[in-house]
Amino acid sequence: MYEEKITSIIEDPAQEFDIVVRITREEDIAVARQMAKQLAQEIGFSLADVTRIATAVSELARNIYRYARQGRIMIRKRLEDRDSPGIEVIAADRGPGIPDVELVLTRGYTTWERSLGIGLSGVKRLMDSFAIHSEVGKGTVVITEKRRRTF
């Protein structure tokens, strides 16, 4: 089941997503961040939420680059609810996987020497929903979403 899910997401994402960024170089992190920021602005997110989304995408892309060396960031508009449209971000890779997901989600946890420790726990706090599927030796998929707030 896991292998089928990750294969379908990684192998053929273009049909379902507004933006797909392959992460293979450090420069791709900035590309993913900028594209997420632009899409969030188009949907009408507040400046604060645009920044939250862009930061979350940056962290997800950086994790792919650091730990898996390659993967994809896939972003799509969620417009079903006209009163509260949103944006969904999926980060997928076939890297080493995460042996202890709970530990990684601990605030301030890092395995990178010069890291701020924002990582996945920060992504979880920045976004409205967060799910992670990881299997050692097979890869990781993070699915997160932010809904536009109405004031």
Image: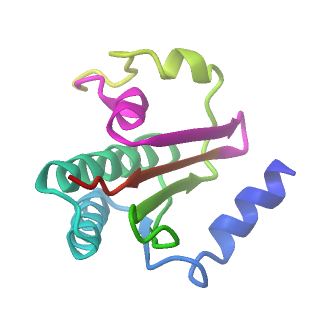
Instruction: Look at the picture and state if 60 lies above or below 83.
Output: above
Residue at position x 24%, y 46% from top? 52
Please count the marks in the image: 0
Residue 75 quadrant: bottom left
**Residue 32: within the magenta?**
no
Left or right for 135, reference 106: right
Q: In the rendered view, would you say 97 is above or below 73?
A: above
Q: Residue at x 66, y 78 (%)?
A: 12
From the viewer's perspective, is residue 112 above or below residue 93?
A: above
Q: Position of residue 141 (x, y in %)?
A: 61, 48
Identify which residue is drawn at 23% across, 61% down. Answer: 45
Query: Camera-side residue: 20 or 37?
Result: 37
Q: Residue furthest bottom?
A: 15
Q: Where 54 sits versus 20, above or below?
A: above
Q: Is residue 142 left or right of residue 111?
A: right
Residue placed furthest toward the left: 47
Residue 3 horizontal side relative to residue 95, left or right = right
Stretch in magenta: 116-139
Q: How is the structure coloured here?
A: rainbow
Q: Within the magenta stretch, is there residue 117?
A: yes
Which residue occupies 64% across, 66% down? 10
Residue 73 coordinates in the image, percent (x, y):
45, 62
Q: Would you identify the image quadrant in which residue 28 lies?
A: bottom left
Q: Position of residue 34 (x, y in %)?
A: 21, 66
Whole-percent x, y for residue 13 in the image? 60, 75
